[in-house]
Amino acid sequence: MTQSDTGQIADPSGPVGIFDSGIGGLSILREIRKLMPEEDLCYVADSAWMPYGEKPRAVVRDRSLKIARFLVEKQGCKAIVVACNTATGLAVDLLREELDVPVIAIEPAIKPATECTKSGVIGVMATPGTLSGEKFGLLRGRFSGDKRIISQPCPGLAREIEKGKPHSIRLRKLLTRFLHPFLEEGADVIVLGCTHYPLVKPLIQEIAGPGVQLIDSGEAVARQLHRKLDESGLRSSSAREGSQRFWCSGKIIECASSLGILSGNTPHVEKLPV
């Protein structure tokens, strides 16, 4: 076991907690599972309150802290992954102040996008909450340089993906509308700035065309978690494949169905008690 600066004992055999406003964080969970298959994972979909990107700051901070405390205090999680760009922008500072475990944040992958673009034009699609946040503004200013970054708010897109119908006509129409400004301006790299969006990456790629590269933050978050667990002496030493548990604050059957469609394996989902 590892003792934190505040005296709390963290157990390397404990699970990693992951939360999002809905099922979008599944894209992060996949990358963590690929990199660290031995780790037990606890996932919370706060579907009753999604999307965070369209909620007031106070609501996002309150929900984020309640869920993180549930994962740490009730499930024994040794680290928290905030698998939501909006929650990162509005609440990650609060979580790091209040919790005694590593908190891993996520941010739109603007830095790698600036390294990949040849046209010098980059598109960022995200929720209104993410794009209007101070953290995104600072991130954009830090890495834009001589590149042109076009931000596209995508209200309603996360909610549509949440339905678990990746081939619906409405989803295609929404994506076509949101991607159009990028293609008109010659963007050759598009940043998927919401964890829901990689869940329908094949459809986004089809609409954007083969000449456009799509970038998301999943692998980077998994690598950062790996580093933090190593630094803290919290990596699991288990030789078995890690387990997965799911909680949802919304409708359990709908959440399980959507997770099943998007992951290929319908999980058991429990009611979130906070």
Image (tube, grey):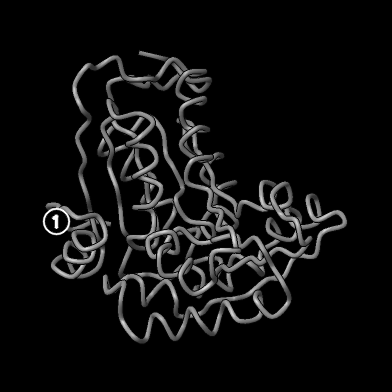
How many numbered dots are placed on residues in this image?
Answer: 1
Residue 93 location (% of width, % of height): 59, 46
Nearer the observer, 155 or 30? 30
Q: Quadrant of residue 12?
A: top left
Residue 239 location (% of width, % of height): 22, 16
Q: Residue at x 66, y 80 (%)?
A: 181
Q: Is residue 231 left or right of residue 16?
A: right
Question: Helix or strand or loop: what does disc 1 sit on?
Answer: loop
Is residue 220 shown above or below 117? Answer: above
Mark 1 residue crowding within 10 angstroms, few (<14) / some (14–19) / many (20+):
some
Q: Residue at x 39, y 70 (%)?
A: 50
Q: Residue at x 35, y 63 (%)?
A: 22
Q: Residue at x 64, y 60 (%)?
A: 189
In the picture of the structure, the residue carrying the numbered disc 1 is 266
Nearer the observer, 70 or 264? 264
Identity of the residue furthest to the right in this view: 146
Nearer the observer, 253 or 37? 37
Q: Which quarter of the figure is the N terminus placed in? A: top left
